[in-house]
Amino acid sequence: MCALPLGQELCPRHGLVIELNFMPQHSIYRRFDVPGTILHGGGCRRQIAALVHELGATRVLIVTDPGVVQRGVVSEIVELLNNAGISVSVFDGVQPDPTDANVEAGVKALKAHRADAIVAIGGGSPIDTAKVIAIRPANPQPLREFMGLHKIAHAGLPLIAVPTTAGTGSEATKVAVITDTERQVKMMMLSTTLLPRAAVVDYELTLSMPRGLTAAVGVDTLTHGIEAYVSRKANALTDPIALQCIELCAHHLRTAWNEPENHTAREGMMLAATLGGMAFANSSVALVHGMSRPIGAVFHLPHGLSNAVLLPAVTRFSLASAPERYASIARILGCDDLSAWLEQLNRDLEIPRLSQCHGVSRDHFDAEVLKMAADAIASGSPANNPRIPTQEEIVALYREAW
Ligand SMILES: [Fe+2]
């Protein structure tokens, strides 16, 4: 058996070590799924009615949350749809860290309106929830049976995803994360049937994002690019997309945070978010996301924040197992010490350490840390990391992030 590091192979013709970064992988096949249509650019939200018509739909359920409604984004889109003769009902019952109960309430609204398409407007929470609402009528078994890879057999209603944060990339992925309220577990579901039919990526919807949110979702985006690129499932189709995501973050994240009205920076981060989603959904996320979901489930920290507090420590832990890949990332970010650079980024964006996060106490942390490590491993994501950790090593990493 060849004992070369991941990503390297002995060339059968020349006997040389070759990098597999952009080479076809011979022994496995990969699948690459993205929405059928992606509109991007300032103002493209005004094409949503045309997309609904293209889908042959006439009755739309909008899935969103109260914060997005308050920002006035939903009323504008309702008006656009109504003016095009489309009947609209709004379900705004999605909470942060959306739950199984949110999904079931949305299904009720869907049936009450007899909707034949869904438009999801918001961050990752409304879009993830809408994905599961859309497939629910065709897949009536208990929700927890959908946890894992390709467990949702039947396609649902067509979904148009309209992100209002430049972060999760959910508009471009076949992934949804829904909290099982009884077990307090974030269920990661990945199925092609969850993929939106169209994504409408209009950076103008992010201009009003507050700084804290810009920081958290921006580092989430960067984490998607990094994890997709260093993942054991990285491949020739996802590598260039992941690197482009990282490069856009390098250019635009600090500016978007410093100058919220800077259109170039906002557009750059919006594109980065969608590219990050395309990359990780077809490669994978890894240890940072595996460890961040249990933090979210236990302490109800926003997803981007729980990733950001882990990213420097997990990067330090993983570096030596994929040195070439991490070196490529460091080159793009323009630094020598990648984990120090990521730590500085958190400080610059005023992202707190885990111990400083609202609602996280040391006693609660100590009581939960073993279960969090077990849940992280059970999610499967740590197995995609360049360096696969033991449960003890995950506990140590949680403590390092504290
Ligand atoms: Fe994420």
Image (cartoon, helix red, strand yellow):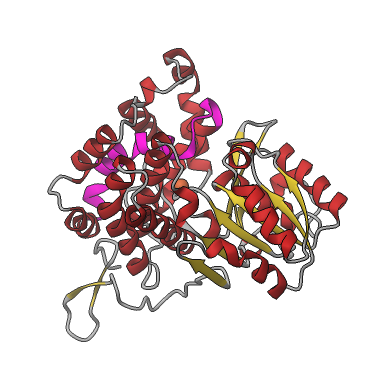
Most common SS among magenta residues: helix
Q: Residue furthest left?
A: 336
Q: Give the x, y percent position of residue 402.
A: 34, 24
Task: Verify whether residue 103 appears in magenta.
Answer: no
Q: Residue drawn 79% across and 66% down? A: 58
Residue ranking furthest to the top: 363
Measuring from the top left, give residue 288's x and y in whole percent. Answer: 39, 43
Q: Quadrant of residue 289?
A: top left
The residue stretch that appears in magenta: 297-322
Q: Can see residue 277?
A: yes
Indicate the quadrant containing the N terminus: top left, top right, bottom left or bottom right.
bottom left
Q: Is residue 199 above or below residue 387?
A: below
In the rendered structure, the answer to whether residue 23 lies left or right of residue 29 reads left
**Residue closest to the eye, 27 or 116:** 116
Q: Nearer the viewer, residue 157 or 227?
A: 157
Answer left or right for 86 relative to 316. Answer: right
Query: Where residue 97 appears, x then y in whole percent?
Result: 58, 37
Which residue is at the far bottom? 13
The correct choice, above or below, for 365 with respect to 328 in the image is above
Q: Residue at x 45, y 59 (%)?
A: 274
Q: Quadrant of residue 153?
A: bottom right
Camera sees residue 147: no
Q: Is residue 312 magenta?
A: yes
Q: Residue at x 32, y 64 (%)?
A: 244
Which residue is found at the position 63% from the left and 62% from the top?
A: 160
